[in-house]
Amino acid sequence: MNITTILFWFLTVLAIGSALMVIVSRNPVYSVLSLILTFFAISGHYLLLNAQFLFIVNLIVYAGAIMVLFLFVLMLMNLNSESEPSRQKWLKFAGTIAGGCLLLVLVAALRDVDSKSTYALVNAGDSGLIENLGKTLFRDYVVPFEISSILFLSAMVGAVVLGKKE
Amino acid sequence: MMLLSIDLTFLLEKAVLISAVIAISLVAAMYSTWMERKVAAYMQDRIGPTRAGWGGLLQPLADGLKLFMKEEIIPNASNKFLFVLGPGLAMMTAMMTSAVIPWGKEIHIGEKVVSLQIADINIGILYIFGVVSMGVYGIMIGGWASNNKFSLLAALRGASQMISYELAMGLAIIALLMLTGSLSLRTIVEQQSTGWWYFFKQPLGFLIFLVCAFAETNRTPFDLPEAENELNFGYHQEYSSMKLGFYLFAEYINMFISSALMATLYFGGYDIPFVNDANLVNSWGVNAVAALQIAALFGKIFLFIFFFMWVRWTIPRFRYDQLMNLGWKGMIPLALLNMLVTAAWQLYRHA
């Protein structure tokens, strides 16, 4: 057991446990907070893979920005256990079947993967460091990068236009 | 010393360093409250606290004791778990940034070289940005869990204020990054000890960063989340005893840490002004220079903290729409302009 292994198991248990809490807990605010914890655990895994940029961007974008907006909405909607509509039986049934189908597809897809050759390098490799990532992004993938940034810009402009009063 | 193939000396070194940094931040924050009273008194032509200890120096201890002794009230209608979690989160996010700030170069203990920085990660600035974006949760969770409409309103205000000013702050940092070419705070400080401080190369960026730091720490003139004339007492209205103390204290720690950050990014960090640190090491030895560097950094930090207080007792609070207008229509375009000019200058210089 070295420190990486310990961290790996700790983060794994944390990620799975908090992900379960997201769907199990009754209070939606708890769900959001558990989801934030899940993002933290997954970011920790990125760090173990030496993908530092991905680690911090995951935290800034998901845990820091998107989940704050989630919390905003939940807090303003005033969701209590009393006001929560009771879910119908067939809805639960349909949900179970849909989830089971997704699990089936995932298992089928991952079954044939040659896992030995595609193991991620834990605590090694430098492809995730910010300098290498930047060089790859701006040398080899400049056009897709620029196109996606234009997409983001147009989405932002669209949001501003929609939000503006007449 | 190895146990389970873990390097225990490394763990011990870091644990000592982390405890020291936390203790220093807490003491600095504690004495900032004393300093704030004294500065406020001076600006209003009073003398401030004098009774507890010489010049009122024991006043922070008395305040802390008072907060501990007070009755702790948890409202019946509140969400108990989140109500307790809120102040803790506020405190934690306030402390986390200190992990990447270099407090000095290094000290030698016998054969061992100890770096005076908890973690020199090569994404230091992004880490700070990440922690800053977490700072919202303490306020939001505390305000919502209180189950009080004023608290909730204040929490929403606080959160939207912090999100708005984070953007301009990030853009100001991007302009700085174009000059440094590195995200590691230690590298940035080293560059400044040999060359010019980045304040002289990025004055506009520094100004934007400063204003955003005021907004992020919820200090006057941006203390809208606790605007007492509109929202009674803001997001910590339902809190009492040390939980209230944690919220108030987190503000001072935030102030201390953001002062340290401004000193590190724009004013040379632990670089001793007007002195070539490398030459000084040869004549004075490593440890003495490290002590001087820490003193230099703390001098800069306390100048910034004084500035925070000076502004608080001089400038009245903004109205909420003025705050949002300044953030979105003033700071962000200015930061974008700063970024464009910096980019053009870098392009011209390297072309």
Image: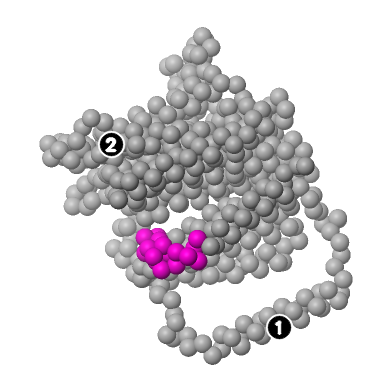
Residue at figure coordinates x 50%, y 61% from the top left:
A146
Asked if residue B134 is among those painted magenta in the image, a careful observer would answer: no
What residue sits right under mark 2 in the picture? Answer: B196
Query: Residue B42 versus residue B315: which sits nearer the camera?
Result: B315
Secondary structure of the residue carrying tag 1 is: helix
Q: Is residue B2 above or below residue A116?
A: above
Which residue in the rendered view is the most extreme toward the bottom?
A112
Q: Which amino acid does label 1 sit on?
A: Cys
Question: For the residues tagged 2 and 1, is the chain the same?
Answer: no
The chain letter for the residue carrying disc 2 is B
Residue at figure coordinates x 61%, y 88% from the top left:
A108
Q: In the rendered view, does A2 fall on the left or right side of A73?
A: left
What residue sits right under mark 1 in the picture? Answer: A101
Distance from disc 2 to disc 1, alpha carbons, whole Å, reads 62 Å
Q: What stretch is highlighted in magenta?
A: A128-146
- Horizontal and vertical percent for residue B289? 22, 37
Q: Is residue A51 above or below residue A165?
A: below
Asked if residue A139 is among those painted magenta in the image, a careful observer would answer: yes
From this viewpoint, is residue B341 visible? yes
Residue at figure coordinates x 40%, y 75% from the top left:
A121
Q: Name the chief secondary structure element in magenta.
A: helix
Q: Which amino acid does label 2 sit on?
A: Trp
Within 10 Å of disc 1 (Cα), the crowding (few <14, some 14-19, many 20+) is few
The chain letter for the residue carrying disc 1 is A
Choose mark 2 or mark 1, whichever is in front: 2
Within 10 Å of disc 2 (Cα), the crowding (few <14, some 14-19, many 20+) is few
- Horizontal and vertical percent for residue B14? 36, 52
- Horizontal and vertical percent for residue B85? 63, 48
Query: Residue B183 versus residue B145: which sits nearer the camera?
Result: B183
From this viewpoint, is residue B186 visible? no
